[in-house]
């Protein structure tokens, strides 16, 4: 199975800050990388697919990228509704594994 | 409005069975693959199973293979997950999600993404 890792495990930030979360796969997954946002009690939400394509309706302050073997999710100016847990996921091959999550907390 | 609504979660004893349902609305259910994802207490998201549109092919994660069965009734716009031989490790919130082909201008081939999710149903396995 492909293992997904994320860093940091948790992150404290303030409204207006820029933050970046990193995700790495245990083997090559090409462009088969998605990012999701999950707030307790709510449905998870697809933010970005195919490394950097913004899902319809998602604010442009969210962006995805790749640097070498690392995939990144950046939020340019944090808003109160952005404090949640973020997961990367590979769909290169089954099982479609998720990273362990990065929890973004208000400082 | 595109919507998914899970139901059927309950408290069940180890070794027991449950059937979860996911009612879809607002889109042509039969033309989409569907999937189940779960989140155990204090844990992250874990992919459980997928059923494709068309041929209805199914696949499972190793932790549920042989115990869980995914199915769909396109006439009722409903997805199911039959869970047998439940163990305490199956305790989780179970989410259904729609599987879409996500395209990017940067690549020639689409990839699967889970673009619509329900709010989940709680399954607790305990004696």
Image (cartoon, grey):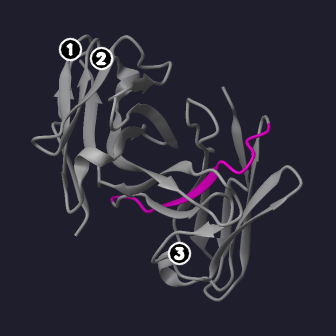
- Give A7 or B107, whichever is nearer the viewer: B107
Q: Residues within 10 Å of mark 1 (few under 14, many from 20)?
A: some
Q: Quadrant of residue A19?
A: bottom right
Note whether A58 is above or below A84 in the view shown: below
- Do tag 1 and tag 2 residues touch (Cβ < 8 Å)? yes
Q: Residue furthest left?
A: B76
Distance between the alpha carbons at the discs numbered 1 and 2: 5 Å
Quarter of the image where the N terminus of chain B is located: bottom left
Q: Residue at the location (74% across, 69% down)?
A: A20
In which quarter of the view is residue A85 placed?
bottom right
Alpha-carbon span between mark 1 and mark 3: 39 Å
Q: Position of residue B20 (x, y in %)?
A: 20, 34
Q: Residues within 10 Å of mark 2 (few under 14, many from 20)?
A: many
Residue span colored magenta: A28-41
Percent x, y for residue A100? 61, 44
Q: Chain of mark 2?
A: B
Q: Are marks 2 and 3 in contact (CB under 8 Å)?
A: no
Nearest the eye: A4 or A96: A96
For the point 53% across and 81% down, which residue is it? A59
Chain under numbered label 3: A
| Secondary structure under the numbered disc 2 in the rendered image | loop
Q: Residue at x 78, y 35 (%)?
A: A26
């Amino acid at each position: 199975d492909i293992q997904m890792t994320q860093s940091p495990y948790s992150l404290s930030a303030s409204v207006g800050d820029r933050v970046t979360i990193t995700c790495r796969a245990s083997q090559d997954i090409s462009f088969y990388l998605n990012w999701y946002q999950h707030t307790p009690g709510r449905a998870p939400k697809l933010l970005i697919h195919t490394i950097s394509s913004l899902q319809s309706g998602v604010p442009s302050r969210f962006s995805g990228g790749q640097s070498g073997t690392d995939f990144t999710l950046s939020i340019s100016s944090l808003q109160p509704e952005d404090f949640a847990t973020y997961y990367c996921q590979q769909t290169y091959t089954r099982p479609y594994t998720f990273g362990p999550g990065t929890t973004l907390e208000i400082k | 409005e595109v919507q998914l609504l899970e139901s059927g979660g309950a408290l069940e004893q180890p070794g027991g069975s449950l059937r979860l349902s996911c009612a879809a609305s607002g889109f042509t259910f039969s033309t989409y693959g569907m999937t189940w994802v779960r989140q155990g207490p204090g844990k992250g998201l874990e992919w459980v199973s997928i059923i494709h549109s068309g041929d209805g092919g199914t696949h499972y994660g190793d932790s549920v293979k042989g115990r869980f069965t995914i199915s769909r009734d396109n006439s009722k716009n409903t997805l199911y997950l039959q869970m047998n031989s439940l163990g305490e490790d199956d305790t989780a919130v179970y989410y259904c999600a729609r599987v879409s082909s996500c395209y990017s201008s940067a690549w020639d081939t689409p990839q699967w993404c889970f673009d619509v999710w329900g709010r989940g149903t709680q399954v607790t396995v305990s004696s």
